[in-house]
Image (cartoon, helix red, strand yellow):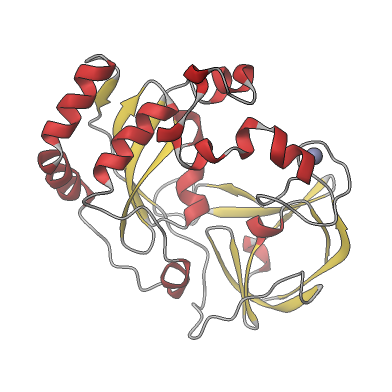
Amino acid sequence: MAVVPGASQAQPVSYQLRAGDHRIDLNERLGAPLQLRWSGAIACTHCGRATKKSFAQGYCYPCFKRLAQCDTCIVKPETCHYFQGTCREPEWAQQHCFQPHIVYLANSSGLKVGITRKTQMPTRWLDQGAIQALPILEVDTRQQAGFVEMLFKEHVGDRTNWRAMLKGDVAALDLKAERDRLMSVTASGLGQLKREHGVDAIRELDSQHYAFHYPVTTFPGKIVSHNFDKQPEVSGILQGIKGQYLLLDTGVINLRKFTGYEVSVA
Ligand SMILES: [Zn+2]
C-alpha cells in the first residue's frame, strides 16, 4: 500500500493500493464495500520466487537468511557488526546504514522514540499511524542512531500499541517539550556518545513539528483482526485507513504483514 502525506497538514494522508500495474485510490472507497481475496500465492518481494510462507513480512527463506536488510542488526542497529567484517552485504550497508539517520519522537499510541533513514521521512511515521512527529537529532550512521535510541529508551517507549493507535483516541502531545525534557535527562549520555563518535557525528535539530490526519470515518470499538492465512477472503465496508491498516466494519487488516501475497481487489 502506497501512502502519501496530505498536501498540507490539515489534509488527510492519501492511500493507494498497488494492484499489478494500476493503483486503487483507497480514500475514494471510504464508506463503500471492499473485498480482498488472496489467491494462495506469495512471491518474495526481493527475488520474486514463489514461497509457501512469508518471512520478515515479504521474503522467501533464502533471502531472509542472506540479505542484510533481514538481519537482526537492522531492528537492533546498536548490534551492527560491519566493523567485525561479518556484514551480510557490505555494499548494501554502505547505501543504507552508512547514510544520515534521524532520531525522532512520534505520537502513534502515545510518545515513542524511533529512528529512520533520513530519506524515509515522513513515510516511516505514516506507516506507524503517527499523528505527530518531531525529528530531534541527525546522525551519520544507523548504528549511531541505535546508540542514541538505546539511551532515550531508558526514558521513553519505542513501540506502537497498534490497538490503541487504531482506536483513534490518541491525545496530542507537546513534542517539543518532550524533546527538551529528554535531551536534558540524557545530556551526559549524549555528551559521551559525541566524544566517542566525534562532535559532528551527532547533531541536534531544530525541526518543524509534523502532524498527520488519516482518512477514517469510524474508528473500531472492539478490534478484530483479519488474517489471510486463516481466511483468504476479507470483505466489509471500508471505514478508514491508518498506518498500514485497513479499517473495515468487519475487522482490521494489517496489509504490511501480507506483503508479497497475491491479492485481488473488488
Ligand atoms: Zn527471495
User: What is the count of numbered marks?
Assistant: 0
Answer yes or no: is residue 50 visible: yes
Quadrant of the frame with the C terminus: bottom right
Q: Nearer the viewer, residue 79 or 205?
A: 79
Q: Which of 36 and 190 is in front in this view?
A: 190
242 left or right, relative to 164: right
Residue at image x 37%, y 64%? 109
Q: Which of 149 and 106 is in front in this view?
A: 149
Q: In which quarter of the image is residue 101?
A: top left
Residue at image x 63%, y 26%? 88
Q: In which quarter of the image is residue 241?
A: bottom right
Q: Where is residue 23 in the image (x, y as percent from the top left)?
A: 76, 50
Q: Position of residue 177 (x, y in %)?
A: 15, 49
Q: Position of residue 111 (x, y in %)?
A: 29, 57
186 left or right, relative to 5: left
Q: Nearer the viewer, residue 177 or 112?
A: 112
Answer yes or no: is residue 135 visible: no
Residue at image x 77%, y 51%? 260
16 left or right, relative to 169: right
Q: Position of residue 245 (x, y in %)?
A: 59, 64
Residue at image x 18%, y 50%? 178
* Quadrant field for ligand 1: top right
Q: In this view, does 147 lie above or below 215?
A: above
